[in-house]
């Protein structure tokens, strides 16, 4: 369906209200309630704007990347952010620039409608789907199909709040498919398990398994049932309790399943919702044919390339993915331009934005991988530096803690030491209870807070320990002590020292050292 034609007429209202907001004749609250539906929010201070470029499944084609590069160059965009929902945000735009940039983004294939607000959000997908060794099957074509379908609800009845959907291709569950409003978790037998009404933020919940081993061609029936369940039972009165996860409480788990199954039975009456197998086969064949042509070149990779920690051998022999993690997901706009210039003449190459605010460049021959490595050398140096942080309070209107500032402090401190890679894990830092960085599922996480010291309130973060997102052993961590910002780098150094003393990694050390870990944290509480 051509959503550009469907949504294009909405832009005049967006232009009008954005300019009224700029002229201060429209309030911050009223503008936020409107602009989110276009994937844009005013930043803190209400003078500049962010535009969220939506890309189904986190899939960023060369054509889309070209569009981003052209917008960055034409409008001199100074700041960009990779998001945990596999999108890209362009920041610090004035009202005029925002209005001029949004249509080119749409025309390049990045529909921002529904990028915010009470709508179905960007569909998330395992970033290496289709190329990952050991994956159960390629879930990307299903994510793309569902993404197209969910856009159709943007002009439909109003939802109580946003609806997030995700696909995962292995038990690693990187997209948190089992902890979303709607999740499709792949099985080895080529089917999906379906999870509903999960989510993070206040009152986080692991999703309820609503169905097992379903035919992937039937996913739109389950999406329709979830939409109707949400519309019929979601809270339209209290926004704080309007997310789907609260239906686990209001309906009870068994009541929720019964209501969902009732809506599912109704959805199955519409046979048009079944995906045509030919669509999936066409995707798979085209993908395989493009990559076979590259494999036939027979390039050999050097030992140095194969040994690089940022290089991943794909399941297609002779092809590679290169990982690039800008610190905190804050990618330099010029880096996106440079990436496009590097890959524009490479056949079948595309980018995949990850839930951890990084980018995979996939389908590379060895010589192509070397070129991509060269232009992405400014990113994370180790596992700890791949840590995830939301944009933070200096930019976000609702932010409480400076997530990016905290991560920068921690990276600067840890670089003074020579710890082995893995001594500290990837941490997740959220600036406020919205928990955009997903600290609940991280081995170490933080959430913005304030702490009273004497008679003054000082910036701090609440500590979270021991979360897990692996399918079948999900664990949402509980809030621990509140720690002052300047003490957090010291806390991490103490943990690193304890792990290093046993010549192991944090992942191995943390099991069996829970008490010691809490004792270390207590020093700063």
Image: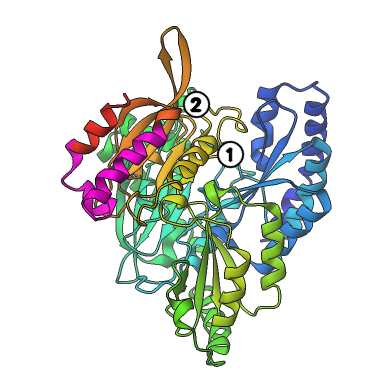
The answer to whether residue 23 shows anywhere in this view is yes
Q: Which mark is residue 157?
A: 1
- Please give the residue where the numbered disc 2 appears in the rendered image: 239
Q: Residue furthest top?
A: 455
What residue is rendered at 48% in x and 83% in y? 302
What percent of the width, then of the height, locates residue 183? 40, 52
| Magenta-colored segment: predominant secondary structure | helix
User: In which quarter of the view is residue 184 placed?
Assistant: bottom left
Q: For the magenta stretch, what is the residue range?
A: 488-515
**Left or right, residue 276 beside residue 374:** left
What percent of the width, then of the height, locates residue 488? 40, 33
* Dot in front, 1 or 2: 2
What percent of the width, then of the height, locates residue 285? 53, 82
**Left or right, residue 221 beside residue 499:** right
Residue 375 forms part of the magenta stretch:
no
**Left or right, residue 150 beside residue 99:** left
- Say above or below: 413 vs 148: above
């Amino acid at each position: 369906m051509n959503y550009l034609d469907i949504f294009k007429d909405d832009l005049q209202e967006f232009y009008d209200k954005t300019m009224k907001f700029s002229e201060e004749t429209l309030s911050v609250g009223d503008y936020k309630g409107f602009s989110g539906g276009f994937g844009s929010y005013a930043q803190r201070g209400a003078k500049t704007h962010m535009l969220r470029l939506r890309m189904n499944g986190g899939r960023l084609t060369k054509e889309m990347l070209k569009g981003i590069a052209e917008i960055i160059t034409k409008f001199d965009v100074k700041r960009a952010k990779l998001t945990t929902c596999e999108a890209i945000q362009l920041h610090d735009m004035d009202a005029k620039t925002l209005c001029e940039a949004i249509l080119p983004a749409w025309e390049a294939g990045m529909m921002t409608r529904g990028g915010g607000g009470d709508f179905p959000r960007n569909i998330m997908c395992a970033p290496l789907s289709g190329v990952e060794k050991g994956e159960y099957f390629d879930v990307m074509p299903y994510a793309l199909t569902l993404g197209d379908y969910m856009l159709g609800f943007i002009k439909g009845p109003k939802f109580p709040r946003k609806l997030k959907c995700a696909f995962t291709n292995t038990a690693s569950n990187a997209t948190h498919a089992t902890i979303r409003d709607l999740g499709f978790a792949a099985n080895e037998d080529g089917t999906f398990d379906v999870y509903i009404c999960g989510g993070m933020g206040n009152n986080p919940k692991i999703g309820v398994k609503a169905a097992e081993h379903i035919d992937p061609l039937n996913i739109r029936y389950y999406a329709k049932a979830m939409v109707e369940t949400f519309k019929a039972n979601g809270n339209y009165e209290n926004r704080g309790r309007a997310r789907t996860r609260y239906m686990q409480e209001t309906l009870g788990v068994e009541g929720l399943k019964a209501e969902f199954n009732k809506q599912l039975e109704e959805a199955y009456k519409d046979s048009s919702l079944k995906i045509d197998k030919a669509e999936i086969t066409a995707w798979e064949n085209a993908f395989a044919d493009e990559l076979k042509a590259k494999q036939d070149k027979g390039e050999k990779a050097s030992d140095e390339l194969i040994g690089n920690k940022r290089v991943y051998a794909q399941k297609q022999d002779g092809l590679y993915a290169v990982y690039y993690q800008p610190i905190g997901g804050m990618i330099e706009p010029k880096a996106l331009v440079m990436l496009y210039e590097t890959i524009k003449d490479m056949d079948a190459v595309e980018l995949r934005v990850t839930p951890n605010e990084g980018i995979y460049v996939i389908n590379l021959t060895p010589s192509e991988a070397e070129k991509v490595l060269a232009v992405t050398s400014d990113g994370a140096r180790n596992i700890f530096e791949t840590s995830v942080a939301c944009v933070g309070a200096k930019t976000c209107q609702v932010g409480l803690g400076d997530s990016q500032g905290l991560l920068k402090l921690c990276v600067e401190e840890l670089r003074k030491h020579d710890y082995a890679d893995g001594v500290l894990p990837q941490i997740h830092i959220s600036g406020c209870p919205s928990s955009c960085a997903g600290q609940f599922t991280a081995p170490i996480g933080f959430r913005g807070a304030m702490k009273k010291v004497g008679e003054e309130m000082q910036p701090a973060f609440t500590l979270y320990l021991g979360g897990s997102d692996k399918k079948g052993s999900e664990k949402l961590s509980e809030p621990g002590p509140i720690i002052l910002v300047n003490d957090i780098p010291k806390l991490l150094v103490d943990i690193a020292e304890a792990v290093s003393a046993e010549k192991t990694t944090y992942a191995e050390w943390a099991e069996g050292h829970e008490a010691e870990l809490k004792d270390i944290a207590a020093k700063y509480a």
